[in-house]
C-alpha cells in the first residue's frame, strides 16, 4: 500500500529534504478546526506549506492553516498537520490518502487524529476532551473503495490502539485533565445534523458527532499505522441545547481547549516509548 503513489513518494522526499533529522517522525498529529495553536508548541520547527507538497490539501475551511510542521514535542520528533481535507469540501472521501501515505513513507509509525465535535452527552460540555474508543460511519462513504488487493479488507476491531489509549489516559490522569472516552459518529457535513439524526446516533451508541477523522482512520489502518484520536467538544449536538450551531462556535470553542490538548500530547509523548 505504500508503493505506487508518485505524489506521496514525492511529498515524502520533500519532507525528508526540508526537515533533515526531523524527517522520520515518531508520531504524526492531525489538528482539527481551531486547534492549530498546538503546532506552536513544537521546538526546532520546520514548516512546509501544503502547497509545496504534491497531493496535500489546500484547505478552504476557516480554522485550518494548511501547513505541515515538523519539530519536537515532549522529547520526540513529530509531524503536525495544521489542517486537513474533509469529505464535504469536494466530495473526495480519499482526500487525505496522499498526505497519510507520504507520512507513512517517511517511516512514521503512528498517528494521532484530533477534531472538534458535538457532544451527545449533556454532562460532557464545550471544552471537554474525549478520547475516541470506536466509531460509527454514518456517512457510509469509505476511502478504500476501489483499492485493489485483499489489504482493503481492513480489520477495524481494535482500530483505536489500546496501548496508545492507555498512555493517553495515564497522561491525562497525571495532568488532572478530565479525559472522557466514547464513540465518535461521522456525518459527512457540511450541514450540521438534525435533532432526529442526533437522537438516532445517541440511541445507537454514539457519544460525539463530527465531520472528519473516520476516513483518515480507515486509511491509516489500511496503511498499517497505529492510531489514537481525540475529540474536542465544541458544543452540545443539534437539538440538545436549544441553540443554533455555527462553524464559528466549533472553531472558537476548540481553540479554548488547545492548551489542554497541547499539555496532554506533550506529557503523552514524554511518558511513552516510541510507537
Ligand atoms: N456536529 C458535527 N461536527 C461538529 C459539531 C457538531 O455538532 N461541532 C463541531 N464539529
Image (tube, rainbow, N blue to C red):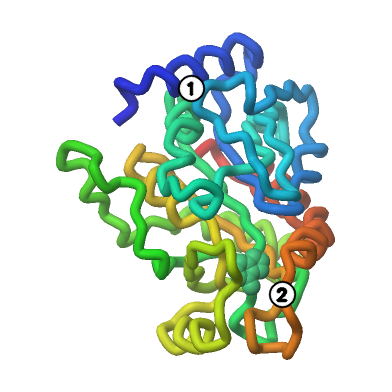
Residue that appears at 65% across and 16% down? 19
Question: Looking at the rendering, which quadrant does residue 160 occupy?
Answer: bottom left
- Between label 1 and label 2, give the one nearer the viewer: 2
The reply to whether residue 164 is in sight is no
Please state which of residues 62 and 216 is positioned toward the viewer in this rendering.
62
Residue that appears at 63% across and 32% down? 78
Locate residue 5 relative to residue 65 in the image: left or right: left
Quadrant of the frame with the N terminus: top left
Q: Quadrant of ligand 1?
A: bottom right
Q: Residues within 10 Å of mark 1 (few under 14, many from 20)?
A: some
Please state which of residues 153 and 5 is positioned toward the viewer in this rendering.
5
**Mark 1 or 2, nearer chain start:** 1
Query: Compared to 46, does 133 lie above or below?
Result: below
- Real-space Cα distance between discs 1 and 2? 39 Å
The reply to whether residue 31 is in sight is yes
Total numbered circles: 2
Residue that numbered label 2 is attached to? 245
Residue that numbered label 1 is attached to? 106
Question: Looking at the rendering, which quadrant does residue 156 occupy?
Answer: bottom left
Residue 254 position, x and y percent, is 76, 61
Q: Residues within 10 Å of mark 2 (few under 14, many from 20)?
A: some
Residue 217 position, x and y percent, is 44, 51
Ligand 1 contact, mark 2 (Cβ < 8 Å): yes
Query: Compared to 70, does 33 lie above or below?
Result: below
Question: Looking at the rendering, which quadrant does residue 47 occupy?
Answer: top right
Residue 8 position, x and y percent, is 44, 23
Residue that appears at 73% across and 21% down? 46
Residue that appears at 31% across and 22% down? 3
Residue 152 position, x and y percent, is 23, 45
Amino acid at each position: 500500500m505504500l508503493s505506487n503513489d508518485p505524489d506521496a513518494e514525492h511529498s515524502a522526499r520533500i519532507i525528508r529534504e526540508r526537515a533533515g533529522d526531523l524527517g522520520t517522525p515518531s508520531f504524526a498529529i492531525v489538528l482539527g478546526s481551531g486547534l492549530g495553536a498546538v503546532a506552536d508548541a513544537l521546538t526546532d520547527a520546520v514548516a512546509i506549506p501544503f502547497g509545496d507538497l504534491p497531493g496535500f490539501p489546500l484547505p478552504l475551511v476557516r480554522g485550518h492553516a494548511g501547513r505541515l510542521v515538523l519539530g519536537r514535542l515532549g522529547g520526540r520528533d513529530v509531524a503536525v498537520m495544521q489542517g486537513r481535507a474533509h469529505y464535504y469540501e469536494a466530495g473526495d472521501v480519499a482526500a487525505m490518502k496522499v498526505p497519510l501515505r507520504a507520512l507513512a513513507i517517511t517511516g512514521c509509525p503512528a498517528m494521532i487524529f484530533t477534531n472538534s465535535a458535538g457532544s451527545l452527552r449533556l454532562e460532557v460540555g464545550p471544552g471537554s476532551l474525549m478520547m475516541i474508543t470506536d466509531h460509527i460511519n454514518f456517512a457510509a462513504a469509505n476511502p478504500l473503495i476501489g483499492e485493489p488487493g485483499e489489504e482493503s479488507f481492513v480489520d477495524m476491531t481494535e482500530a483505536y490502539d489500546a496501548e496508545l489509549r492507555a498512555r493517553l489516559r495515564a497522561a491525562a490522569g497525571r495532568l488532572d485533565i478530565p479525559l472522557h472516552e466514547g464513540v465518535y459518529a461521522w456525518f459527512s457535513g457540511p450541514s450540521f445534523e438534525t435533532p432526529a439524526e442526533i437522537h438516532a446516533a445517541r440511541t445507537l451508541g454514539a457519544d460525539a458527532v463530527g465531520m472528519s477523522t473516520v476516513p483518515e482512520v480507515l486509511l491509516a489502518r489500511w496503511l498499517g499505522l497505529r492510531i489514537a484520536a481525540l475529540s474536542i467538544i465544541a458544543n452540545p449536538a443539534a437539538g440538545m441545547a436549544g441553540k443554533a450551531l455555527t462553524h464559528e462556535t466549533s472553531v472558537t470553542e476548540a481553540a479554548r481547549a488547545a492548551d489542554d490538548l497541547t499539555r496532554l500530547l506533550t506529557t503523552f509523548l514524554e511518558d511513552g516509548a516510541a510507537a
